[in-house]
Image (spheres, rainbow, N blue to C red):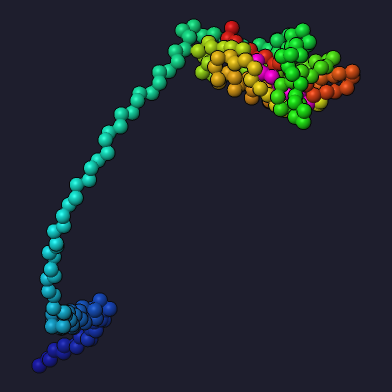
């Protein structure tokens, strides 16, 4: 009688991965975390300080009425000067025979221009000062440019001009040292502009000194300045 033999199958081993090990420990970590959280909350409720409501009441205070100052009426701004309907070209002229007026005995008698009092400085007040060669502006073109720059824009645009006559005291080097307003133009802005322009002309352009017997001498001269719109 024949007998059958069955061969034994070899055992198959299963490898355990890191993921499997993590899943196995997850249950332990989960229940441990729940236990720790429960204990922490219990201790928090047991030892938490007792809270009480504070008093939020307040004491009423008496209000005092303040009298407001009376309202001040602000006046309206001044009306703007009407500009000319037709544009004009402004030009400032300084004529040689008008800008430096000659100082002579005929036009300035001695009785009208008394000498300065004894002990006084010649440059303090206009006084008669004889000379043979009158002062002249060294560069009339540059002087006209300076005068044009000092012409007040508001008056120029309105077509307003005028002539200013100034007593000007020049030292023996032709420098403007003092001034007195002899005749106003009727507009303070033009008077001030003429005086400022004369000082800048003296500084940046210069006057030739007056000569008396070939010697430079300080003199008072009558200086006229005309602002005009043509």
Identify the residue shown where x is 12% and y is 64%: 57
- Quadrant including the C terminus: top right
- Residue drawn at (53%, 10%) of the image: 159
Q: Is residue 208 magenta?
A: no
Q: Is any atom of residue 196 visible in this view? A: yes
Could you say where residue 213 lies in the image, as x and y percent from the top left? Answer: 89, 18
Quarter-of-image position of residue 62: bottom left
131 sits to left or right of 158: right
Compared across the picture, whether 194 is left or right of 154 comes to right
Above or below, 156 against 120 in this view is above
Considering depth in this image, is 99 or 16 the residue closer to the camera?
A: 99
The quadrant in which residue 103 appears is: top right
Image quarter of residue 26: bottom left
Say whether residue 169 is magenta.
yes
Please state which of residues 197 and 177 is positioned toward the viewer in this rendering.
Answer: 177
Q: Which residues are magenta?
A: 164-171
Q: What x and y, as percent, mark residue 146? A: 66, 21
Tell me which residue sits at (57%, 12%) in the image: 161
User: Which sits in the foreground, 1 or 30?
Assistant: 30
Residue drawn at x 58%, y 9% is: 229
Asked whether residue 201 appears in the rendered view, the answer is no
Give the position of the N terminus as an image quadrant.
bottom left
Residue 88: % across, % down: 54, 8
The extreme right residue here reads 214
Outermost residue on the bottom side: it is 1
State whether the magenta stretch is mostly helix, strand or loop.
strand
For residue 77, above or below residue 84: below
Total marks in image = 0
């Amino acid at each position: 009688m024949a007998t059958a033999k069955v061969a034994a199958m070899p055992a198959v081993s299963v490898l355990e991965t890191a993921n499997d090990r993590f899943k196995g420990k997850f249950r332990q970590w989960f229940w441990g975390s729940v236990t720790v959280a429960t204990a922490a909350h219990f201790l928090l409720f047991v030892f938490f300080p007792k809270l009480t409501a504070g008093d939020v009441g307040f004491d009423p205070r008496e209000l005092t009425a303040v009298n407001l100052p009376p309202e001040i009426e602000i006046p309206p701004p001044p009306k703007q000067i009407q500009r000319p309907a037709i544009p004009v070209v402004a030009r400032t002229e300084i004529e040689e025979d008008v800008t430096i007026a000659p100082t002579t005995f005929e036009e300035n008698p001695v009785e009208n221009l008394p000498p300065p009092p004894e002990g006084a400085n010649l440059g303090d007040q206009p006084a008669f000062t004889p000379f043979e060669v009158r002062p002249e502006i060294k560069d009339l073109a540059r002087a006209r440019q300076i005068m044009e720059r000092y012409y007040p824009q508001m008056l120029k645009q309105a077509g307003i001009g005028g002539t200013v006559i100034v007593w000007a005291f020049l030292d023996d080097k032709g420098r403007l040292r003092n001034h007195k307003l002899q005749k106003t133009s009727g507009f303070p802005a033009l008077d001030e502009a003429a005086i400022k322009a004369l000082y800048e002309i003296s500084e940046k352009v210069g006057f030739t000194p007056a000569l008396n017997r070939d010697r430079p001498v300080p003199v008072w001269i009558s200086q006229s300045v005309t602002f005009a719109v043509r």
